Image (spheres, rainbow, N blue to C red):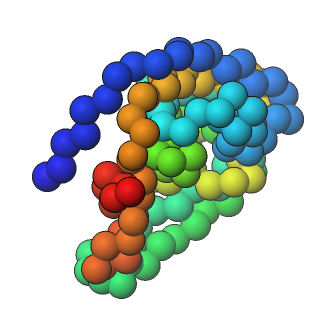
């Protein structure tokens, strides 16, 4: 286990509207506001299109399944990290028939509204690097 101590920076609430792209909007926001490291503290809302990835293997290499779901899906929970401007965001979503959880992907579209709380982290040397298994692991950049 690695531990990285951070100071808290700015705190934001994003209010996305109908037909906004979820992750693409967050990514544009972090670029426009020069946010290097942060975490998604909370995310709620409803999507009309959901693109979500889940692991479907137990070993390496990891095999992923991608689901593209059309129709309203409520975001019950959304959280993640932004490390060195790279986002890794997961969500738990559901409708009246099913619940899905996993890694959110580009292409998710807001149905009505989505509210996302982003907390900036102040740590200048965090980065992500591939480990021996091909996993992106948070590390401290060696300058």
Can see residue 47? no
Task: State the residue lying farthest toward the front.
Answer: 143
- Among the 4 quarters of the image, the one containing residue 43: top right
Question: Left of 49 or right of it: where is 1?
Answer: left
Q: Residue at x 54, y 39 (%)?
A: 36
Question: Left of 119 or right of it: where is 59?
Answer: left
Q: Is residue 57 above or below residue 109?
A: below
Task: State the residue lying farthest toward the left.
Answer: 1
Q: Residue at x 53, y 15 (%)?
A: 11
Q: Is residue 4 above or below residue 137?
A: above
Can see residue 13? yes
Q: Position of residue 3 (x, y in %)?
A: 19, 42
Q: Residue at x 59, y 24 (%)?
A: 116
Task: State the residue lying farthest toward the right.
Answer: 19
Q: Residue at x 36, y 84 (%)?
A: 61
Q: Is residue 30 above or below residue 133?
A: above
Query: Which of the pair 64/48 is nearer the observer?
Result: 64
Q: Position of residue 115 (x, y in %)?
A: 63, 20
Query: Which of the pair 5/52 is nearer the observer?
Result: 5
Q: Position of residue 13 (x, y in %)?
A: 61, 16
Q: Is residue 12 above or below residue 90?
A: above
Q: Position of residue 104 (x, y in %)?
A: 57, 50
Query: Which of the pair 133/142 is nearer the observer?
Result: 142
């Amino acid at each position: 286990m690695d531990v990285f101590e951070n100071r808290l920076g700015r705190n934001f609430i994003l209010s996305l509207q109908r037909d906004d792209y979820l992750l693409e909007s967050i990514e544009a926001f972090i670029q426009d506001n020069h946010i290097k490291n942060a975490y998604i503290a909370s995310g709620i809302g409803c999507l009309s299109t959901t693109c979500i990835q889940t692991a479907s293997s137990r070993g390496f290499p990891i095999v992923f399944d991608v689901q593209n779901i059309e129709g309203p899906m409520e975001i019950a929970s959304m959280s993640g990290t932004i490390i060195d401007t790279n986002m890794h965001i997961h969500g738990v979503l559901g409708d009246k028939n099913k619940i899905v959880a996993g890694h959110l992907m580009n292409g998710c579209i807001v149905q009505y509204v989505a509210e996302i709380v982003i907390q900036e982290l102040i740590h200048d040397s965090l980065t992500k690097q591939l480990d021996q298994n091909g996993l992106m692991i948070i590390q401290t950049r060696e300058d």
